[in-house]
Amino acid sequence: MSQVKENTLPKYGGETSPSRGVRPLNERARRLERRVTLATVLLPYAGLAGGILIFWNRGVNRLDLAVFGVMYSITVLGIGMGFHRLIAHRAYQATTFLRTALVIAGSMAAQGPVIFWTAVHRRHHSYSDREGDPHSPHLHGEGAVEILKGLWHSHMGWLFNHELTDWGTYVRDLLHDRMIFKLNRMYFLWITLGLLLPAVAEGLITMSWLGFARGFLWGGLIRVLVVHHTTWSINSVCHVFGSQPYQVKDHSTNNVVLAIPTFGESWHNNHHAFPSSAVHGLEWWQVDITGSMIKLCAKLGLASAVKVAKKKQPEIDLNQKSA
């Protein structure tokens, strides 16, 4: 395991501007994007409503919670350990097996295909809390109403803007990766798998269609809903509320309340200070489940070249525009 000092973000595609990094969608693509976004955001709420109606008098049993917990852990690690630290920031290297498993797990979180997700995230780092950031809460004014508008936009409102982050600018490396490209094209299969796996598991354990329905709701739709808002809180809450031990060129914060549910992703100021570090919890008390899992995989021979930032104030070039 190597330790690295990080003073700048890694570059993807060279110098960019918001106009170069974003392309408007044509009307047909806009309609499709709108439908997919609405379905992805609203269907989990339908699952929650269904769960309340169907199980009002039955309650939630231990198996429901177990199925929810397993699927929650798999998909949160898929996003944080896979999409974020492995694919977007190349903070470590993984075997083909682990890389494939993490991309599939991240896709089951229903937050967009891996190439789309990575392009948006790298663009976020290019223009964090400046014009061009796809989901900053700080570009809507100074008043209380404007702050609320910014929080809504950064949390989920940006999903409905229907603009396309340019893949040629931000994810050119992934476009040449056959495995990633193939997994990306199978995105809707992975979402379906993420809904059916817990349903089939609970159905087989209970040998009942009711168990199938409970697994589909708790391990599937309701789990997607909770993972959505847990992850989206990094974009909103962790750019407004929390501490800033490192001076960076944006408003990213460390939020201790979200550390456990996000598996360590909420040490967001640490991440923006050292974006290529595979470990975000830099103090002994900063719980970082994802970072610990990466270290465990390194010991098991599934991961290598793990980058861990030293706890030192990075030098920030405010004129730097890199992803």
Image (spheres, grey):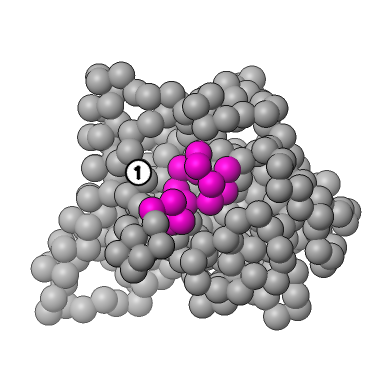
In this rendering, the answer to whether 319 lies above or below 227 is: above
**Which residue range is magenta in the image?**
127-140
User: Up-down: is 70 above or below 92?
Assistant: below
Q: Is residue 126 above or below residue 256?
A: above
Secondary element under disc 1, as helix, strand or loop, is helix
What percent of the width, then of the height, locates residue 222?
Answer: 30, 61
Q: Which residue is mark 1?
A: 159
Q: Decide whether the magenta segment is chiefly helix, strand or loop.
A: loop
96 left or right, relative to 55: right
Residue 169 found in image quarter: top right
> In terms of image quadrants, where is residue 126?
top right
At label 1, counting other C-alpha atoms closer than 10 Å, the crowd grade (few under 14, some 14-19, many 20 or more) is some
What residue is rendered at 25% in x and 34% in y?
34
Note whether residue 179 is visible. Answer: no
Indicate the amino acid at tag 1.
Leu
Residue found at x 72% / y 35%? 11
Residue 36 picture location, percent across and down? 28, 36
Left-right relation of 273 to 130: right
Measuring from the top left, give residue 83's x and y in whole percent: 57, 45
